[in-house]
Amino acid sequence: MMLTASDVSWHLGGRGEGRRIVRGASLGVQAGECVGLVGPNGCGKSTLLRMLYRSLAPVPGGQVRFNGRDIWRMSAREFAQQTAVLAQDASQGFDSSVWDTVMLGRLPHQSAWAKDSAKDKALVRERLEQVGARHLAGQRFASLSGGEKQRVLLARALAQQPQLLFLDEPTNHLDIRYQLELMHLLKALACTVVVVLHDLNIAAQFCDRIYLMQEGALLACGAPEQVLTPQRIHQVFGVRAEVDVHAATGRPRIAYWMEQHAA
């Protein structure tokens, strides 16, 4: 396994105190996989992801390992040289050009006060081309549309040359076309992906495996058709569902509805 988490928990208000947001979660991610984390709002998906990418430390006893090493025994620089993150709030606070925004992805590989090298510049051009955003290089990041910003931020993450890419609801606030384009880009990448998604159909179409969360715990893991069953969807989300196979994609397709209660 490239990434493993063993019995990780996190408590609101400090270690061992307050409300448990994530409790005893264990998972594994193999090289080359696209693994999705799904579940209702507030179930702990983003908190678990933040423990996986070293933003939050689990309570004592839990451990996250990357390529066999405890991530908290790695330096932040070393971890950033091998992994990259596209967080929910990643589009906030940038008032620079698209080029400079993507160049930030090269920082973990540069020595202090070093100028951008020819290799850095070539990688930034390649990554912008890869996400279809090279024509935006001279524009201000703040002037871009939501879909364009996501492309640029993905290019910045890819400029880190990560083995493992973490994403927290990358399709949020994007229209249908941009959602599909972004997910197709992720599937075409030569790296491992761990992604939090709230759209079960997007997860079913693009993820190799899915972890389903409920109330801070991992309830199920497996291929989308194994995890996203009508019974589990009803148990976790409280809605009725029908699951079939989409004729065009060959992947599971989910329809939902609410039960009507008599007055």
Image: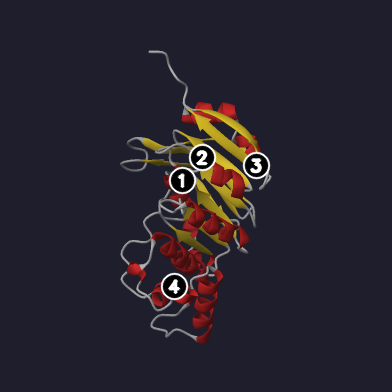
The amino acid type, in three-letter code, at marker 1 is Leu
**Crowding near the residue tagged with mark 3, few <14, some 14–19, many ≥20 C-alpha atoms within 10 Å:** few
Amino acid beneath label 3: His
Q: In the depicted view, which residue is nearer to us: 134 or 32?
A: 134
Checking the image for residue 102, the label placed there is 4
Identify the residue under disc 1. Answer: 48
Which residue occupies 61% across, 55% down? 2
- For label 1, the SS is helix
> Is 140 left, or right, of 172 in this rendering?
left
Residue farthest along the top direction in this orientation: 263
Q: Earlier in the sequence, mark 1 or mark 2?
A: 2
Which tag is nearer the camera, tag 3 or tag 2? 3
Between marks 3 and 1 in the image, the one whose residue lies nearer the viewer: 3
Q: Which residue is mark 2?
A: 25
Nearest to the eye among marks 3 and 4: give it.
3
- When the figure is inspected, residue 262 is found, relative to residue 218, above or below; the finding is above
Give coordinates of residue 29: x percent, y percent: 60, 50
> Is the residue 52 above or below the residue 246 in the image?
below
Q: Looking at the picture, tell me which residue is in the foreground, 196 or 151.
A: 151
**Counting residues from the N terminus, which is met first, the one under dot 3 or under dot 2?**
2
Q: Which mark is residue 246?
A: 3
Q: Are marks 3 and 2 in contact (CB under 8 Å)?
A: no
Quadrant of the rendered structure where residue 17 is?
Answer: top left
